[in-house]
Amino acid sequence: MRIDLHTHTTASDGLLDAPALIAEASTRGVGLLAVSDHDTTASVDAAIDAGRKAGVEVWPAVELSCDVEAGEVHVLGYFVDHRLPWFQALLDRLRAGRLHRAQRMVERLAALGAPVDFAHVAALAGGGAIGRPHVARALVGAGWVRTVPEAFERYIGRHGPAYVERLKVTPGEAVTILRAAGGLAVLAHPGWARNDELISGLVASGLDGIEVYYPDHTPSLVSHYAALARQYGLLVTGGTDFHGGDLATRVVVGGQYVPEEVIQPLREAAARRRASAEAPAVALAVE
């Protein structure tokens, strides 16, 4: 059975809606899939329903976007109770921050002589959470760049002239949020940051696992993060980070090897978390 615990839909910055993603996963022999859109769970229920019909088990998940001084950090949450009102209110704030950020990027692009229509950016998001990939696609559509990666490199990457900071959640806050929502908090693609001190700090905050199997992880990085997981007693996950097209890893859904033996420990940990879940002690501020 193929396993993919990191995928995106049109609810954030993927190119396929939930039913189409499940159909693609089924065609490629994926039996277990997690829908982990950025700062939204809008596609989770539709994916679960489509999965039942197609024989694909779907886990509810989300990917929270965080910033640290060295760059972006993403924290995945598995088995979150996505119907919790306080959790959805917080995700609403994060998506509103994404909208404001995209608007400011469009303003900066106009000042740089590479104008794009914000209505087009919003249309590309299709009602989902707006992200930089939508701005990048608008730049491609307007003819200012040839590809999405070029848009990031020239304009909207972290050090680009049109880059705008996001509404911030720290990685530690993300871990707290996801655990309070009854989920398992997992550091996504740790090879991006290559900061083992970040992992040790997040363990102290309650981190449950790390994404060991990932397309951008070399065999040596896979071995390294598997060893760190053993050292800290962390769960292991993996996935493609599938978006579709020329976004992110550009790996087909189910195209990343993830061993089946990682699944049962995740199920058992999720059951324990659900049994002990409590409402958050404080309403986390996202400023």
Image: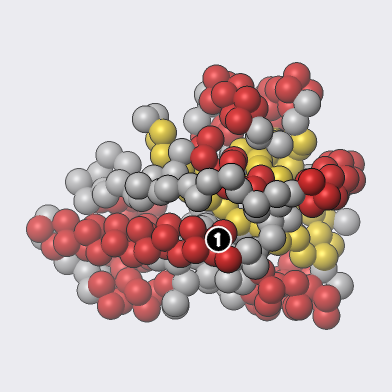
Quarter of the image for residue 7 reads bottom right
Expressed as whole percent of the image width and height from the top left, the position of residue 160 reads: 25, 44
Q: Which residue is rendered at x = 17% and y = 66% of the image?
A: 115
The kind of residue on which mark 1 rests is Trp
In the displayed structure image, the side of residue 66 where residue 166 appears, left or right: left
Mark 1 residue element: helix
Quarter of the image for residue 33 reads bottom right
Q: Which residue is rendered at x = 12% and y = 55% of the image?
A: 112
In the displayed structure image, the side of residue 144 where residue 22 appears, left or right: right
Residue sitting nearer the eye, 178 or 163: 178
Quarter of the image for residue 123 reads bottom left
Colour theme: secondary structure
Q: Which residue is rendered at x = 68% and y = 77% of the image?
A: 46
Expressed as whole percent of the image width and height from the top left, the position of residue 38 reads: 52, 57
Residue sitting nearer the eye, 210 or 205: 205
In the displayed structure image, the side of residue 94 where residue 144 appears, left or right: left
Residue picked out by circle 1: 86
Expressed as whole percent of the image width and height from the top left, the position of residue 210 reads: 68, 36
Q: Is residue 181 above or below residue 20?
A: above
How many residues crowd mark 1 within 10 Å: few (<14), some (14–19), many (20+)?
some
Q: Can you say which quadrant of the picture contains the N terminus?
A: bottom right
Q: Can residue 215 be spotted in the picture?
A: no
Q: How many marks?
A: 1
In the displayed structure image, the side of residue 175 where residue 19 appears, left or right: right
Q: Is residue 17 above or below residue 260?
A: below
Q: Which residue is rendered at x = 60% and y = 48% of the image?
A: 280
Q: Can residue 186 be spotted in the picture?
A: yes
Expressed as whole percent of the image width and height from the top left, the position of residue 111 reads: 10, 58
